[in-house]
Amino acid sequence: MLLAVFAFSFSACSKIPQRDNQKTNANSQTINSLQATSLVIPKDGVITTPKVDGFQQFRVKIPNGWTLTRFDRSDGVSIELGKDKYLINFIQPSYIGGGGTCVFPDDKQLPDGPYIVKYTKFISLKTSFGNVRMGNDSPRQGQSADSDFYTACSFYANTKGIKDDHMGLATSIGAIVYEIPTSYDKKILDEMNQIIQSIQIVK
């Protein structure tokens, strides 16, 4: 299970609206001091995230075979999609700070700043909220050696008035993180990418 892995500050956001057959499972449990609630995915597979100041609200279509879990904490909420050992985390705080700059092999020069993350491998995705690169930042300190992690980078920082030629650790819909086995199934990774590309911004 992967939870908040960034130097982000969270503030409480509203609950996911209960729509049709999307109901809270009565068997909630506490994991690592967080309240974890399994949710029933609607028949059409589409969920809508809460509206959070500073970020775009969005809808995402969840394929068959995936689970949906909401983690409640005193300073925020994260939404986790899971399939076996494959996880996608969406983190959409109302305040983001202390992020970082993403550096890729094709960057012409290194940026200045205290927090720079260099990626040698990445996945490029074209989405409704802009071009995104999922940078592979494994291995992670304190995390299982059996897992690989991919973190979303985008030019979203530029829309916040920051002039920079490099992507940052944020998107207009918040943070997105993959966790996959080191010996992964390419078909499931492709399905994860398709989930991200299915996202539609709520106007």
Image (tube, rainbow, N blue to C red):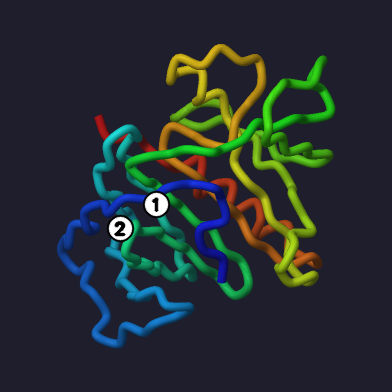
> Callout 1, which amino acid?
Lys
Residue furthest front as drawn: 114
Q: Is residue 101 left or right of residue 58?
A: right
Q: CA distance from mark 1 to mark 2?
A: 8 Å
Quarter residue 200 falls in: top left
Asked whether the beta carbons under mark 1 and mark 2 sit within 8 Å of each other, the answer is yes
Q: Is residue 61 left or right of residue 190?
A: left
Q: Is residue 189 left or right of residue 91?
A: right
Relative height, residue 61 to residue 57 (above, below): below
Residue located 46% across and 60% down the image: 63
Residue at which label 2 appears = 44
Residue at which label 1 appears = 61
Front-lying residue, 166 or 147:
166
Residue located 56% across and 23% down the image: 155
Q: Which mark is on residue 70?
A: none
Quarter residue 183 falls in: bottom right
Circle 2: element type = loop
Q: Position of residue 159 (x, y in %)?
A: 45, 18
Residue located 48% across and 46% down the image: 8
Front-lying residue, 146 or 18:
146
Relative height, residue 195 to residue 174 (above, below): below
> Callout 2, which amino acid?
Asp
- 1 vs 2, front mark: 1
Point out the image quarter for the N terminus: bottom right
